[in-house]
Image: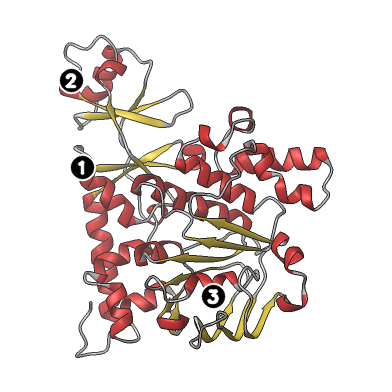
């Protein structure tokens, strides 16, 4: 769920009684769908495989032509615009990035601006700007080929390419579905950060309800033929699912899932001692001696957390790096659900948090999350009519 501080650069999208019947089929793949997608919001289509959610999204940029109905993008009828012209004005990001393997990263990101006849300097400047925006150093990555990047890095490039011509609308078809869970969470955080700066209108397709809760300003829960079962804010769907089918998507433990509605930036971070990786062992021991803790966060030269060290391993250590242990971090854009997963995975029972520039910001503890769950439950009870149970 976004908290955009930017003025929306996106535009409203309206689907008005849109249907799709494939040639040779007697049954529609999408049947009479109407949706109003506000400018500058992230709207997530979630539903089971084969329900038509991808087809519905692809009709917005006419990669799948509607059989009937009307689609407005801003104040323009999408069906009155040439398909190639329409697609160049709408960003599109798919699973496994869809990069051209024979092109460098610079060429991939600059593809649409090139088709739009931007001059070379403008394209080069835009590519550098976008790579930096998605967390990839242009000097390090621009001249590489996709095969030389990790899956998560390729997805970042895919998002950069989709944003290259500064489109008002971004369509994303399960873009993070093919990466590991830790990378996926990081990419979700990055998308939320970008959206807070850019204010695009984003239509995002997923089968993962947890991802929908994390990313969506609104969620459209779709059934067969893209029937809209419920279209509302995540907190409304979590607390008041429209029917048993929607309740099945929400699943058990809805109170716990509401941790996906809160960001790490919404709770108070606890300070925790930190050192730098090139500090000598004696100074690290002194830091710990002056604190109540038996472990310390290790930072690099740019104050980014890279590892942690427990006091018991410092007794005979020659340097900090030799006894440092790997560390998974969450960002201030992460959800409290992400933080809980990190806490349960770490031996020090805390989640280390990064803020602006991926710099160390503090830690979140289990006590903080328990307080947040209690507060969410109290709020739910306060808004629940007498006699109804809180999920």
Residue 41 placement, left or right of 270:
right
Residue lying at the far front in this picture: please name it. 24
Q: Which mark is residue 318?
A: none
Checking the image for residue 313, the label placed there is: 2
From the viewer's perspective, is residue 317 above or below residue 207?
Answer: above
18 vs 165: above or below:
below
Residue 339 position within the rendered picture, expressed as x and y whole percent measured from the top left: 31, 50
Quarter of the figure with residue 146: top right
Residue 189 shows up from this direction? yes
Q: Is residue 383 visible?
A: no
Q: CA distance from mark 2 to mark 3?
A: 56 Å
- Up the image or down, 125 lies above or below 161; here it is above
User: Which class describes the residues within 10 Å of circle 3: few (<14), some (14-19), or many (20+)?
Assistant: many
Q: CA distance from mark 1 to mark 3?
A: 43 Å
Identity of the residue drawn at 21% across and 47% down? 344
**Image coordinates for residue 350, horizontal then vertical, percent:** 25, 42
Could you tell me how many numbered marks the image carries?
A: 3
- The image's mark for residue 349 is 1
Of labels 1 and 3, the one closer to you: 3
Q: Which residue position holds label 3?
A: 56
Residue 256 image offset from top left, x and y in percent: 25, 65
Left-right relation of 354 to 80: left
What is the crowding at mark 2: few (fewer than 14 residues within 10 Å), some, or many (at least 20)? few
Do tag 1 and tag 2 residues touch (Cβ < 8 Å)?
no
Secondary structure under the numbered disc 3 in the rendered image: helix
**Residue nearest the viewer, comparing 41 with 169:** 169
Of mark 1 and mark 3, the one earlier in the sequence is: 3
Q: Considering only order in the chain, which callout, 3 or 2, is on the residue closer to the N terminus?
A: 3
Q: CA distance from mark 1 to mark 2?
A: 18 Å
Q: Classify 10 Å Cα crowding around label 1: few (below 14), some (14-19), many (20 and above).
A: some
């Amino acid at each position: 769920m976004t908290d955009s501080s930017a003025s929306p650069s996106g535009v409203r999208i309206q689907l008005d009684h849109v249907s799709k019947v494939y040639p040779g089929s007697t049954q529609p793949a999408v049947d009479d769908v109407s949706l109003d997608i506000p400018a500058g919001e992230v709207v997530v289509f979630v539903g089971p495989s084969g329900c038509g959610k991808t087809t519905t999204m692809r009709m917005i940029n006419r990669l799948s032509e509607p059989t009937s109905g009307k689609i407005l993008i801003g104040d323009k009828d999408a069906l009155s615009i040439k398909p190639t012209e329409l697609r160049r004005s709408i960003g599109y990001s798919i699973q496994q990035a869809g990069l051209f393997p024979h092109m460098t990263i610079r060429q991939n990101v600059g593809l649409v601006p090139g088709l739009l006849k931007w001059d070379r300097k403008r394209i080069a400047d835009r590519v550098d700007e976008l790579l930096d925006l998605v967390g990839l150093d242009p000097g390090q990555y621009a001249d590489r080929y996709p095969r030389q990047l990790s899956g998560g890095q390729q997805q970042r490039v895919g998002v950069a390419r989709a944003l290259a011509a500064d489109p008002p609308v971004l369509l994303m078809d399960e873009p993070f579905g093919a990466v590991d869970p830790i990378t996926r969470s990081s990419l979700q955080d990055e998308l939320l950060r970008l959206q807070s700066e850019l204010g695009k209108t984003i239509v995002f397709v997923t089968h993962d309800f947890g991802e929908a809760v994390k990313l969506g300003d609104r969620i459209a829960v779709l059934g067969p033929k893209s029937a809209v079962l419920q279209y509302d804010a995540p907190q409304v769907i979590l607390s008041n699912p429209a029917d048993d089918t929607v309740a099945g998507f929400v699943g058990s433990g809805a109170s716990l899932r509401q941790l996906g509605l809160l960001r790490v930036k919404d709770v108070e971070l606890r300070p925790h001692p930190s050192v730098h990786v090139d500090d000598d062992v004696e100074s690290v021991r002194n830091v710990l001696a002056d604190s109540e803790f038996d472990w310390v966060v290790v930072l690099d030269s740019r104050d980014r957390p890279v590892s942690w060290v427990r006091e018991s391993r410092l007794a005979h250590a020659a340097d900090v790096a030799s006894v440092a242990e790997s560390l998974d971090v969450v960002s201030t854009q992460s959800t409290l659900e992400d933080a809980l997963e990190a806490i349960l995975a770490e031996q020090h029972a805390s989640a280390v948090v990064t803020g602006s520039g991926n710099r160390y910001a503090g830690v979140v503890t289990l006590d903080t999350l328990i307080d947040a769950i209690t507060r969410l439950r109290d709020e739910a009870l306060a808004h629940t009519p007498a006699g109804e149970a809180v999920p």
